[in-house]
Amino acid sequence: KVFLFASEVKAILASGLVERKIDTEALNQFLTFLWTPDPHTLFRNVSKLPPAHVLTLREGEITVREWWDVSFDGIEEGRSEEWWRERVLETLERVVSMEMVADVPLGSFLSGGIDSSVITALMKNHDAGRRISTYTIGVEAEDLRYDIIPDDVVWARQVGKLLDTDYHELTLKPDVAELLPQIVYHMDEPAIDMAIPSYLISREARKTLTVMLSGMGGDEVFAGYPRQLAMKIAGAFDPVPSLVRRPLMGAVANALPGGLPGRLTAPLRNAKKFARSAALDFEDRYLGFGTYFTNEAKQRLYSDELRERTRGLDPYCEHRRYFERVRNAAPLNRLLYVDLKTFLPCLNLTTTDKTSMAANLEVRVPFLNYELVELAARMPPGLKLRGMKRKYILKRAAEKLLPPGVVWRKKAGFGAPVRSWLRGALRPLVEDLLSEETIRRRGLFRPEEVRRIIDTNLSGREDYNLQVFQLLTFELWQRAFIDQK
């Protein structure tokens, strides 16, 4: 037996002791979520060590033990809202000051949203004698025609001016067809759309700094994602028996146009996804919000051989295991726990870490300090999601640092104009790398189904943009790591 370990899979593959083969179960999960949950990787016989775990190898036997976990058992109901507001602010002040301990100047990624703005404001308060360098990335107006990405640069400029930062702004206009293969190589796995702006802003920041603070983690700790609010709204349909709810919501979903590009049609795309997921029960509903290829869609996509090899596999097995751990917790806390164990480390943190390190930049995340995470776990869920207001208590705390217009504005996401890219710069690459000849040679997917997905997406009948993007980066990954091209 041979045991290999490394921080990157490239080192393991370089040993020549691991076959460059695709893990079937991980592939099935990757196509479901567009990323792979721990401990799985797309490489057969290669596993990831999950966060807060220690692996021990002794006399040829491997044991894996979890040494820390967040608990939602000790909810403190008797505290006032003002008490929690003060605790959140003082804990944030403490953890940001801890993260700022360094031998070099630090900067901040600034989107203009609540998380990054709070971090930047606290950095300024901690280091009052120095202007904080902030870095912002925006999207060209031409690319915004197709996507729902808000133009957050306006807000970032406002916060930068308010806090008197050394403000740097980058407009996203890469040669994406040339850059994408490089990103996939740095990621060791197929890249998601946000990997490109993450790498570019990290590369820009590295010109002057070596350490940056990020607002990542605020959504998972304080309930900031739209899907968490959507789960609350969808709960209104729970009294309707599932035998009625499923066909009713299914009919609503089928009646809505799902793929027409453009910002004005974004609510229709979101409503379609909401209707599909609202038809399901609690756990499946939440998993549905993060599902891109359903089991039925994968059956249409898979070749006969892959369909047989994946028979009986449950892509949600890791998520269900985490749901079971917190089965007695409040519904919102169950969702937060699953995200903290899956979506956050396996997608967001992995992407940020690998793209920033590719630029030789260190990124620190104060919102994920264990003191703050444990504090948020003890507070009543209604302080995190109050009515329709997400991250409620964080925003109340932020009122002491920032003006109301910044604190209470509509949330924006961090992404890339993938819809525009697939209709422009990436279209030739899609036609080349996802050609019938290539798909048939791989033997994993049915060429006619891949073609249908591409054409249906371009026509606007369905929104398959992220699915097409991931099929594209999966082929790039196979060329880099399986074929070694």
Image: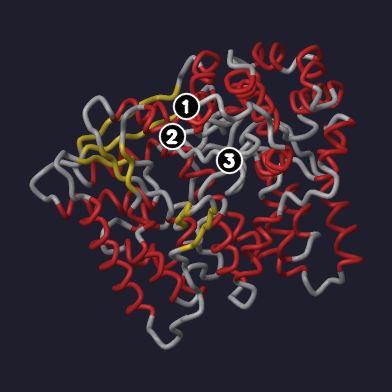
Residue 55 visible in the displayed image: no
Indicate the position of residue 357 as horizontal and vertical percent values.
Answer: 37, 32
Q: Which mark is residue 1?
A: 3
Q: Please give the residue where the numbered disc 2 appears in the rendered image.
A: 354
Q: Relative to 93, is 8 on the left or the right?
A: right
Indicate the position of residue 458 as horizontal and vertical percent values.
Answer: 74, 23
Q: Please give the residue where the numbered disc 1 appears in the rendered image.
A: 186
Q: CA distance from mark 1 to mark 2?
A: 6 Å
* Few, some or many residues within 10 Å of mark 3 (<14, 14–19, 20+): few
Q: CA distance from mark 1 to mark 3?
A: 29 Å
Q: CA distance from mark 2 to mark 3?
A: 30 Å
- What residue do we see at 60% from left, 61% from top? 229
**Mark closer to the chain start, 1 or 2:** 1
Q: Amino acid at mark 3?
A: Lys
**Mark closer to the chain start, 2 or 3:** 3
Disc 2 element: helix
